[in-house]
Image (cartoon, helix red, strand yellow):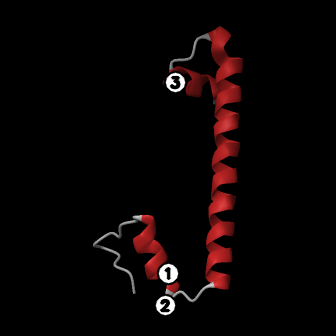
Amino acid sequence: MLHRLWKVLDVEPDETGQVSLLLLMSFFMGLFLAAVAVASQTLFLSHFDERVDLPRAFAISGGHWCADNPPL
């Protein structure tokens, strides 16, 4: 299975160790960022009213909403 992955990524045999470390680091960074995002959103919603403060925070932060999924 790893041989197929290296072939798809076009990794040379002497680069597999470095590429493995980069993929592992990328996975753990994504896991960390997901955990921080969930924790920060949970803390925000537990301390502020989502009907009043959430739209205000969203507007101030410069976020945009998708037309397929408008805010409540």
Which is closer to the viewer, label 2 or label 3? Answer: 2
Q: Quadrant of residue 3?
A: top right
C-alpha gap between disc 2 and disc 1: 6 Å
Q: Residue furthest front?
A: 60
Residue 67 lies left or right of residue 46; in this view the side is: left
Q: In the figure, 30 relative to 10: above or below?
A: below
The residue located at (50%, 25%) in the rendering is 8
For the residue pair 58 and 60, the one nearer the viewer reads as 60
What residue is disc 2 on? 51
The residue located at (32%, 69%) in the rendering is 66
What residue is disc 1 on? 54
What residue is disc 3 on? 9
Secondary structure, mark 1, is helix
Residue 9, horizontal then vertical, whole percent: 51, 24
Residue 65, horizontal then vertical, whole percent: 35, 70
Residue neighbourhood size for the residue with mark 1, other residues' Cα within 10 Å, grouped as few (<14), some (14–19), many (≥20): some
Secondary structure, mark 3, is helix
